[in-house]
Amino acid sequence: MFELFFQKYKLAFNKGGLKSITKAELTMLIVLLISSLSILYYSILKVHLFGFLVSSAIIIIDTIVMLIYEKRKQTKNIDNQITNYNEYVIKKLIELLKQEQFNLYTLEGLDWMIKCCQEHIESKKETTSLISTAIFPVFTLAYGVAINSMSTEEIALITTAFIILIIILNILYKYVICELVELIQNPDKSLYLSLKNELEYIKIQF
């Protein structure tokens, strides 16, 4: 019964799948990718220091813009969530719980649903960090091998490129890689958490 309710919950609230990326976020990610490729090109071939510095400056500016954008987006989302939470989430979920085929709008029904959500959350594998387990060690090894035969200036250049690329990979991990890994390993974990929180909030109203 819980699985049937959960599937209807996903359809009713149009939940599931990858998080949508706005046009602004996509543009900033593309700029980061192009700039990171330029950094990689200039650092490997050890040419065009000016191009390296310009690409680095673009990355820094773009990253700052992304941080400001995300901060404003989070603030706006919080305001929208506070305004619409009861009207478009809680009331709709209560109507779903009250449906005759489920009849779960009782304290016992809510407790049972919350317990089921918790069991599904705990049964899913935790998402591991792709950067910490795979990408970062590879970059560290490549970095260690590369600097053995370099001058001081070249080491400074490669080190700067290495730091910038790690920052970019972390940004990409947050926006893209994490979403894909989560979708594969824990396709519904965030939905179980969301439903559990909503049910607990409804329970408080009794």
Image (cartoon, rainbow, N blue to C red):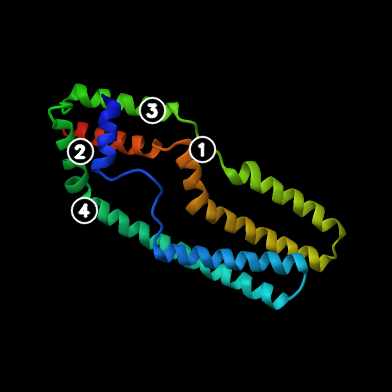
Residue 1 image position (x, y, % from top left): 26, 24
In this picture, is 9 found above or below 87? above
Determine which of the numbered discs, if any, sits on residue 127 in the image: 1
Of the two numbered discs 4 and 2 in the rendering, the one whose residue sits closer to the viewer? 2
Determine which of the numbered discs, if any, sits on residue 93 in the image: 2
| Mark-to-mark CA distance, 4 and 1 | 32 Å
Going 63% across and 55% down the picture, which residue do you hit? 166
Rate crowding at label 3 as few (under 14), some (14 to 19) or many (20 or more) other CA atoms within 10 Å: few
In this picture, is 189 found above or below 86? above
| Mark-to-mark CA distance, 1 and 3 | 15 Å
Q: Secondary structure at mark 3?
A: helix
Rate crowding at label 4 as few (under 14), some (14 to 19) or many (20 or more) other CA atoms within 10 Å: few
Rate crowding at label 2 as few (under 14), some (14 to 19) or many (20 or more) other CA atoms within 10 Å: some
Asked whether the beta carbons under mark 2 and mark 3 sit within 8 Å of each other, the answer is no
Asked whether the beta carbons under mark 2 and mark 1 sit within 8 Å of each other, the answer is no
| Mark-to-mark CA distance, 2 and 1 | 28 Å
Q: Is residue 143 left or right of residue 120?
A: right
Asked whether the beta carbons under mark 4 and mark 1 sit within 8 Å of each other, the answer is no
Residue 105 image position (x, y, % from top left): 16, 28
Q: Is residue 50 left or right of residue 77?
A: right
Instruction: Decide which of tag 3 and tag 4 comes sooner along the chain.
Output: 4
Q: Quadrant of residue 101?
A: top left
Disc 3 marks which residue? 120
Rate crowding at label 1 as few (under 14), some (14 to 19) or many (20 or more) other CA atoms within 10 Å: few
Q: Secondary structure at mark 4?
A: helix
| Mark-to-mark CA distance, 4 and 2 | 16 Å
Q: Secondary structure at mark 2?
A: helix
Going 83% across and 65% down the picture, which residue do you hit? 152
Residue type beneath disc 1: Thr
Q: Quadrant of residue 124?
A: top left
| Mark-to-mark CA distance, 2 and 3 | 19 Å
